[in-house]
Amino acid sequence: MPPLPETPSRWLVLGLLLGFATPAGAKPPGPSTFCAEYPSAPACQGTQPACTYCHVAPPQRNAYGTALEGSLAPGKPRPLSNADFALGLPAALRAIANEDTDGDKAPNQLEIEQGSLPGDATSVPPSGTCGGGENPQFKVCQYDARFVYRRLLSDFCGVSPTYVQVQTFLELGSEERQRAFIDQELDRCLQSDFWRGKHGQLWKVAHPKIRPVGSVKSGEDAGQIPLADYYDDYALFAWSQTDDHDARDVLTANFFVKRSGANPTRYTSVTSTPSQTVDALHRAGNMTSAWTLTSFVMFTALPRNAASQMYRAYLGLDIAKQEGLHSVASEPRDYDAKGVKAEQCAACHATLDPLSYPYRNYNGIAGGLSNRYLPNRLELLFPNDATLAQTPEKGVILGQPVNNLLEWAQVASNSDAFAISTVTDYWKLLIGHPPTPEEHAEFVRTWQAFRTTHGYRVQKMLHDLIRTEAYGAP
């Protein structure tokens, strides 16, 4: 698959990010208070609902948010303080639990508990019924091993089974023998270049995380302005997702990975490579690769874009969509004088800026100082800005203080959000969409086992995924 297209917004993203505003209205205590009231809700399983659960875009509310506002802390002066909001929200949630705010004939509480959206009439709870009637070839709405075998070869090997292969599979007889054969075929296909090779399925999963731009690529398949080689990033990503490797290496590795050969493609860890210049003591996987620093830090003093991209790419939390907000008291400080203390900006930057501080000393594009960890980077590159120099390297991610980017990576990679985001990537690739309310229970079991039973091994998790009804029921 060719690199993603280059667009002006890609390379002006720093200016856009510093200018994006989240209007006042969404309250930081909202998601956590909601989850305290509905702890078993799908939206609260390992994460929290985004502000858009109640808002179109703050302060504009959707149907559910409008109904909630009408029951929230009556008699209290507006705008509510965070304390009054958090105190009044549980009662307001209970007050409208039996209402149907979006008019889809499902009460709010049922929608919340089933995983559909109480403010969106097009989002409805699972019906619990299965259509389709009789099918002479497949067990409609039931797990069908023959269907899985055909689908697996297409998804993981890139081929359809022949008639002889299907007949041989059916002759295995028992479901136990068929499932054992399916597991063998999955392991075989996971070694194929269709899955793990250059521009294979794993590279497809990595595209939105790495966001390649061919015109500035160096090394193999170099572009017109070769600045950094993102094939290194694909190699580490593929390594972390294959064999018995730990998926968390994509964020925590202090090594690099070399790709070689074809059919099968091989990935080998190495301690150094000429295309990477961050020293071993400050490496954090693809978070500190030459491509990440070139592409997402660029020339900026406070790399908000790098931090928000890692947060979005590997934890599935998009701050621009008001996801993953964990406001830090006394933030934002606005060390770089970008106006982020403004009311319409502060709600997001109280999370984003502490998330960005650990990138303080990682340099982007700067001639001979490009793509390196530079102690006192801001003092070196911006010697006349005393306020900017006060920017700390300590930060906060997911509400947890960290001293540097390596600790940031550890907290991130060990979080529920990382496991959920990783399994969601493969769910979307193989099933074709994010988990639906009907699929929620299977999805939760899959990501929880990925984190615990399987020790963050993607290959083991995929054996679970292909056994779900979401994957195996035609």
Image (cartoon, grey):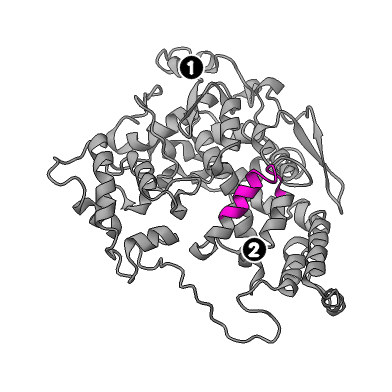
Query: For the stretch drawn in magenta, what is the main secondary structure?
Result: helix
Residue flagged by tag 2: what amino acid is it?
Thr
Residue 178's place in the image compared with 119, above or below, is below
Q: Which residue is mark 2?
A: 468
Label 1 residue SS:
loop
Position of the C terminus by quadrant: bottom right
Among the two numbered marks 1 and 2 on one chain, the one whose residue lies closer to the N terminus: 1
Residue 256 vs residue 186, the one in the foreground: 186
Residue 117 vs residue 175, the one in the foreground: 175
**Residue 270 appears in the figure:** yes
Q: Badge 2, how many Cα within 10 Å: few under 14, some, many 20+?
A: some
Looking at the rendering, the stretch of residues picked out in magenta corresponds to 444-458
Residue 461's place in the image compared with 223, above or below, is below
Q: Which residue is mark 1?
A: 382
Residue flagged by tag 1: what amino acid is it?
Phe
Residue 184 vs residue 40, the one in the foreground: 40
Q: Position of residue 226 (x, y in %)?
A: 68, 37
